[in-house]
Structures are given as C-alpha cells and as structure tokens.
Image: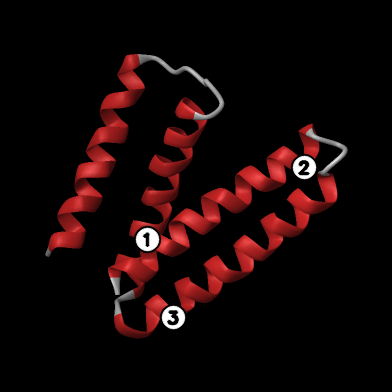
Amino acid sequence: MMFIIISAILLSSLGAFALQKSNVEIDNAGAYSIGGYIAFIISFALLEYGLISMPLVFVLGIWAAGNAVFTASIGYFLYGERFPKKKIIPLLFIFFGLLGLSLT
C-alpha cells in the first residue's frame, strides 16, 4: 500500500511542476496544464485508495512531508534552485522520518 502513497506523492509534485512550467513555456502551456491537471486527478484518486487501508493521519502526514521533500529535490536538481545548508538538515529529518514510518 505504501507504493500507492508514494505514487500519489510523485504525481502530485509532478503536477505542480507541470502547472508551473505552463506559466513559463507559453508555446506548450496547454499541454503542460492538461498534464498537470491529469497528474493531480490521478494523485488524489491514489490518495483516496490509500486511505481505504491506512489511517488518515498516517497517509496525510506522509503525503504532505513527501511532497515537501520531493518538490525540494526536484527544484534543486532540475531547476538549479539553491537553498542554504541549514535547510537541508530539516529536509533530511523529514526524509528519514518518512522512511522510518514506511518501515513500521
């Protein structure tokens, strides 16, 4: 079931980036917008499916924290966004907290 939640996290973050990209690349704005909306719809459907067998607090906590870590990682690696090292440590705590939750 954790695979479904991770898929929802990835699709939600990719949907956000597609919508952001639709504002930057005007020529392909329609394609990015449609892709972003589709990613969000599938993400929320997967999130709903994950709620069937897991507690709400667990699923939404993982989903929110996972989105923060994945979005920061994508921004750093794909878009070259930089942030101070003191912000990397809390992201690592979130990541390892998520890893610990998924292993229990």
Tell me if label 1 and label 2 are in contact, CB under 8 Å. Answer: no
* Image location (x, y in percent) of residue 76: 46, 26
- Residue 50 higher or lower than 76, as above or below: below
Residue at screen point 52% across, 29% down: 78
Question: Which one is nearer the viewer's eye here, 25 or 44?
Answer: 25
Mark 2 = which residue?
22
User: Which of the two discs, 1 and 2, labels the residue nearer the N terminus?
Assistant: 1
Residue at screen point 35% across, 23% down: 87
Secondary structure at badge 1 equals: helix
Dot 3, how many residues are within 10 Å of its Cα: few (below 14), some (14-19), or many (20+)? some
Give the quarter of the image for residue 12.
Answer: bottom right
Mark 3 = which residue?
49
Amino acid on which the number 1 mark rests in the picture? Ile
- In the picture as drawn, the residue positioned furthest to the bottom comes out as 52
- Residue 32 higher or lower than 101, as above or below: above
Q: Name the disc covering residue 18, or none.
A: none
* Image location (x, y in percent) of residue 56: 36, 73
Marks 3/1: CA–CA distance: 12 Å
Marks 1/2: CA–CA distance: 24 Å
* Image location (x, y in percent) of residue 97: 21, 47
Q: Name the disc covering residue 6, or none.
A: 1
Give the quarter of the image for residue 42.
Answer: bottom right
Question: Which one is nearer the viewer's eye here, 55 or 67?
Answer: 67
